Amino acid sequence: MGANSRGIKSWDDYFIPGTRTLKNLVGRPSEPYGVEDPVKLAVLEQAASTVRIAELQRDPLQGDFDYTHFKATHRYIFQDIYEWAGEERVAPTDRWMTKDGHAYYPAGPVLTEAAETQFRKLEQKDLLRGLAMEAFVSELAEIWGEINVIHSFREGNTRTQVVFFADLARKAGFELPLAAFRDKDLRDAFIEARFHSQDTGDNTPLAEVLRRVVR
């Protein structure tokens, strides 16, 4: 069952009516759309996703590192919080999505094809296996930057990307330790590098950040 079949056809349909809180699965019986307090939801989401990410670090999902695998990673991480976990966002379809002044792909066939194209490229590059460290980091930054600007999900894109690409790195013979992103300076540099990628198409700063992390 996709988001459309659940009545989610616009950006506002993701929200609990009368609020700016995302509909969720963790409310009391008196909260049919889930917890209405956005702060409480953020705390519960962080706690639940942290547990699920730890599980994936111990026992990664099996898959082909294609778009299906990527969506399955999101589904696993957010299965306790959002009914639409693992599904493409359905809005906005009429324009590029903007958030804090940065642009992301519009939802719909354009987004789907863009994502499928990137994962086909990843397959054609043999999942970045057999590369020296420098080449691996450069290629990883390119695919990561593109996947980020596509922004497949309504929420949870960054966590999904980090888990997915950490698993990809392991398969390619490298390590991308998630714990490294707890460092505020590195995390801030990572966020800024991705914004730079979105705004300019240049993934060089993202490669510089990943070079500090990948082992």
Image: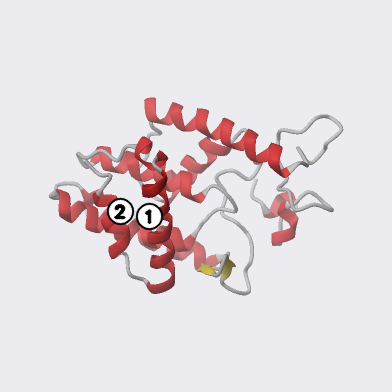
Q: On the image, numbered disc 2 is attached to which residue?
A: 209
The answer to whether the residues at label 1 and label 2 have Cβ atoms under 8 Å apart is: yes
Q: Residue furthest right?
A: 30
Q: Is residue 31 among the parts visible in the rendering?
A: yes
Residue shown at the point (23%, 58%) measured from the top left: 138
Residue shown at the point (80%, 30%) measured from the top left: 28
Q: Is residue 116 among the parts visible in the rendering?
A: no
Q: Is residue 102 above or below residue 147?
A: below
Q: Is residue 64 above or below residue 5?
A: above
Secondary structure at numbered mark 1: helix
Q: Earlier in the sequence, mark 1 or mark 2?
A: 1
Q: Position of residue 42 (x, y in %)?
A: 64, 40
Q: Position of residue 153 (x, y in %)?
A: 55, 53
Residue neighbourhood size for the residue with mark 1, other residues' Cα within 10 Å, grouped as few (<14), some (14–19), many (≥20)? some
In the foreground, 51 or 75: 51
Residue type beneath disc 1? Ala
Q: Position of residue 191 (x, y in %)?
A: 43, 55
Secondary structure at numbered mark 2: helix
Residue type beneath disc 2? Val
Residue shown at the point (46%, 33%) measured from the top left: 53
Q: On the image, numbered disc 1 is attached to which residue?
A: 189
On the rendered image, what quadrant is the N terminus found in? top right
On the rendered image, what quadrant is the C terminus found in? top left
Q: Position of residue 27 (x, y in %)?
A: 76, 33
